[in-house]
Amino acid sequence: MILLTGGLGYIGSHTAVELAEAGYDFVIIDNLSNSKIEVKDKLEQIIGSPIKFYKGDVQNEEILTKIFTENDIDAVIHFAGYKAVGESVAKPIEYYDNNINTTLALLRVMRKFNVKNFVFSSSATVYGRAKSMPIYEDFEVSATNPYGRTKLFIEEILKDAYVADNSLNIALLRYFNPVGAHKSGLIGENPNGIPNNLMPYITRVATGKLDHLNIFGNDYPTKDGTGVRDYIHVCDLALGHVKAVKKLETAPGLVVYNLGTGTGYSVLEMVNAFNEVCGNKVKYEFAPRRPGDIDVCYACPDKAEKELGFKATRNLKDMCESSYNFEINNK
Ligand code: NAD
Ligand code: UFG
């Protein structure tokens, strides 16, 4: 049985689907701080059976203890946390508190119940301004904002925990830019308020909820002047977690993987691909660069392919179509 923290969120819910498909049992804890309980019903529709769910905070060791007592947990995938870069600058204490203390609480309860396998949602943000592209796992890490620092600190905490207890198996998964949605259109990315990220902003422009997209910068040293990122379909990313869980079953110790495609697309390429899918509904204007943004970021995905047998297969069209489909379904 696998415990998914934050399993009703964007990446957690898609991972739940892939785990079920691969035959794994799981239980979810989520405090609904950035998700809705309806996601549980949607997941049950997709999977076709009831889901075990605990509403609660991962910082609360009493509820964790209850979960570990009532379920035979042998691995934890830790998605729960706050994730908005801009908000983390305004609310650093909340970010450090939630992201770090959830991890510590889990590690304490895992130790109590002798659970050894832990998958952590890290981020390409830990590479800061990488010295060259593509980005390899052994590149130096750094952070430029409190959110990124929580990821960096948690990686360090997990490395220290592993040094102290070599029987732990820990996968640090550094996600690049997750986009897209499940093909059913039932689950997807549904941020509160005005989206910060590119794809949810595009889908809201396409459906008339927002007037136009501001493209932050057209003077970067890239193919067309706009920022380049490694967008990975969330269902591919979800499959990466299944592969990571399987890897931990072989007791590899602490392992680090990029989860990306290895291909960088510019903002303009994303907009053009999306317009082909939705019929030219995405208006845009060029705006100044967004503070803190980097020009280019894409992964070398070879290590995950070689050691996990993981390779993203869904293309840009799949990413745009599924995002649009989800937005229309959730109008
Ligand atoms: P999300 O906000 O959709 O999901 C996180 C879930 O955790 C939400 O359902 C939220 O209600 C829950 N949660 C938060 N704090 C909690 C707590 N203390 N107790 C219980 N539940 C709690 O985010 P996501 O996009 O699915 O991201 C999942 C993880 O992946 C996060 O750790 C995030 O930092 C990381 N990540 C995300 C991206 C991205 O672009 N989406 C990129 C890199 C890394
Ligand atoms: N962009 C726009 N207009 C928008 C939103 C974004 O032009 O309205 C551009 C950005 O400038 C950037 C690209 O679209 O060039 C992607 O931006 P996102 O905000 O979607 O993603 P980021 O690469 O900035 O950051 C995301 C997550 C971080 C995570 C990082 C790496 O938000 O938390 O990917 O995984 F750390």
Image: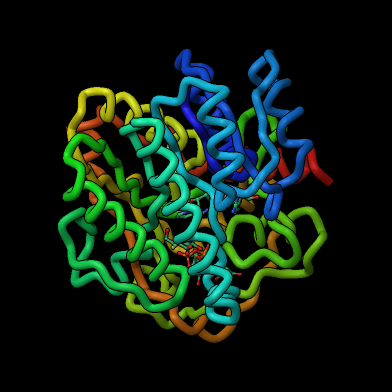
Residue 179 vertical placement versus 268 (above, below): above
> Is residue 191 found left or right of 124 in the rendered image?
right
> Is residue 181 found left or right of 253 in the rendered image?
right
Residue 202 vertical placement versus 317 (above, below): below
> Is residue 214 found left or right of 166 in the rendered image?
right
Q: Who is closer to the viewer here, 321 or 197?
A: 197
Q: Who is closer to the viewer here, 251 or 44?
A: 251
Q: Who is closer to the viewer here, 53 or 285?
A: 53
Query: Residue 308, how many percent across, how many down?
Result: 25, 30
Q: Residue at x 20, y 35 (%)?
A: 167
Residue 291 vertical placement versus 124 (above, below): below
For residue 216, which quarter of the picture? Answer: bottom right
Q: Residue at x 40, y 46 (%)?
A: 108
For residue 203, which quarter of the picture? Answer: bottom right
Regarding residue 149, the answer to whether it shows in the image is: yes
Q: How is the image coloured?
A: rainbow
Query: Residue 237, how many percent across, how many down?
Result: 43, 39
Regarding residue 215, the answer to whether it shows in the image is: no
Q: Residue at x 23, y 58 (%)?
A: 135
Query: Residue 76, how many percent across, how many down?
Result: 43, 35
Q: Residue at x 65, y 24 (%)?
A: 52
Residue 159 vertical placement versus 1 (above, below): below
> Is residue 32 found left or right of 118 in the rendered image?
right
